[in-house]
Image: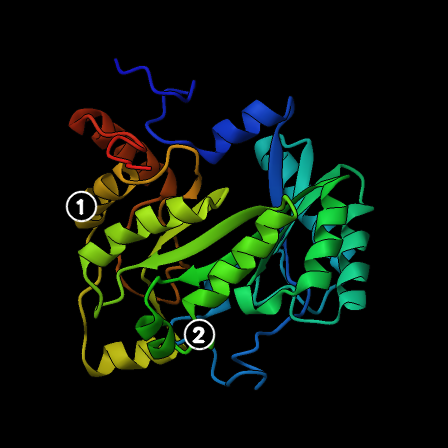
């Protein structure tokens, strides 16, 4: 048996292991919808949103922007405590861009969440073009008392791809946001999507080296989904394009994590979408089974995170 650096005998730096090392009690994220939009939806930079995006694909059932923030948090805590025995919680502002508002509005929302008993921190999902010095200064101030992570959607390291999917920002915006966050000691999470059909595997593998250089604290990797009610779904229906098969994606991940810095915490290796809106790919595999299968594949192939990493 290989003695991995992570004591849970997992061949990569899992978020579960990270939490175990930093907390003596079970911690879970409570996702909330605080009613934000995005600058590529409301006309700030463009309209239409990202071509692949349907927020229904990752919203839990207790998220409802028509309900109060406190109601959503209470519902999430009740669900997570009963299902997982969680004791402490981080409120995850997930749908859309959760810094896309004036600072005073953000301050009110974040501090309302932090006043809920057993909430110990925030994870704030946003875009790199939706932060500025004042907002990051405020988050750094919160970070001195609470566990605060800012999660940037990068999606691709190609400006051509970012233009094609209507992101409305470039890679330089991500690098600037990461630099400003690092200067303030903020923890960061980066979200990427693997599998845009016009990209190639060499670029996806270069992404591992690029993110290692950027020193993101956490990473979420998501295979491309085609979901209903998106511009990409219309493209797919007109002319279907290749999406990852189950085994193909597992084999890609082997190469990806081997090139990734072992200091980056992997919060996600693959994504899920509700079957009622998912068009492709349809793996019919639960996430728990995917993780178990992938870990076993790593052991069989003698692969672990950072094996081929070159600082």
The relative height of residue 280 versus residue 267 in the rendered view (above or below) is: below
* Residue at left offset 35%, top offset 71%: 159
Q: Of residues 246 and 310, which is closer to you in this image?
A: 310
Q: Secondary structure at mark 2?
A: loop
Residue topped by disc 2: 167
Which percent across, then down, holds residue 111? 80, 53
Which percent across, then down, holds residue 296? 25, 28
Do we see residue 200 in this rendering? Answer: yes
Q: Rounded to the nearest whole Å, what is the CA distance between mark 2 and mark 1?
A: 29 Å
Q: Quadrant of residue 108?
A: bottom right
The relative height of residue 243 versus residue 14 in the rendered view (above or below) is: below
Q: Of residues 16 and 84, which is closer to you in this image?
A: 16
Checking the image for residue 13, the label placed there is: none
The quarter of the rendered structure image containing the C terminus is top left
Do we see residue 58 in this rendering? Answer: no
Task: Categorize mark 2 by other alpha carbons within 10 Å: few (<14), some (14-19), many (20+).
Answer: many
Residue topped by disc 1: 247
Q: Of residues 156 and 310, which is closer to you in this image?
A: 310
207 to the left or right of 182: left
Which percent across, then down, holds residue 169? 47, 73
295 to the left or right of 31: left
* Residue at left offset 54%, top offset 83%: 45
């Amino acid at each position: 048996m290989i003695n991995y650096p992570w004591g849970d005998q997992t061949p990569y730096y899992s978020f579960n292991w990270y939490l175990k090392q930093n907390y003596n009690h079970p911690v879970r994220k409570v996702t909330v919808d605080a009613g934000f939009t995005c600058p590529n939806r409301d006309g700030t930079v463009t309209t239409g949103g990202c071509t692949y995006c349907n927020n229904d694909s990752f919203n839990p059932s207790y998220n409802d922007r028509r309900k109060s923030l406190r109601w959503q948090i209470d519902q999430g805590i009740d669900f997570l405590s009963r299902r997982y025995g969680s004791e402490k919680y981080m409120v995850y502002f997930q749908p859309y861009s959760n810094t896309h508002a004036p600072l005073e509005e953000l301050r009110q929302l974040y501090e309302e969440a932090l006043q809920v008993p057993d909430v110990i921190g925030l994870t704030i999902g946003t875009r790199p073009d939706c932060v500025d010095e004042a907002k990051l200064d405020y988050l750094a101030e919160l970070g001195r008392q609470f566990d605060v992570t800012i999660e940037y959607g990068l999606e691709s390291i190609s400006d051509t791809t970012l233009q094609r999917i209507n992101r409305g920002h470039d890679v330089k915006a991500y690098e600037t946001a990461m630099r400003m966050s690092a200067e303030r000691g903020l923890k960061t999470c980066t979200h990427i999507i693997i599998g845009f059909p016009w990209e190639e595997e060499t670029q996806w593998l270069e992404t591992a080296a690029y993110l290692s250089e950027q020193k993101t604290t956490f990473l979420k990797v998501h295979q491309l989904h085609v979901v209903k009610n998106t511009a990409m779904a219309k493209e797919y229906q007109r002319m279907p394009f290749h999406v990852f098969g189950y085994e193909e994606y597992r084999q890609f991940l082997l190469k990806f994590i081997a090139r990734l810095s072992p200091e980056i915490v992997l919060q996600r290796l693959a994504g899920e979408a509700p079957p009622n809106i998912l068009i492709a790919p349809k793996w019919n595999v639960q996430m728990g089974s995917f993780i178990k299968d992938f870990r076993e594949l790593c052991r069989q192939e003698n692969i672990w995170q950072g094996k081929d990493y070159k600082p």
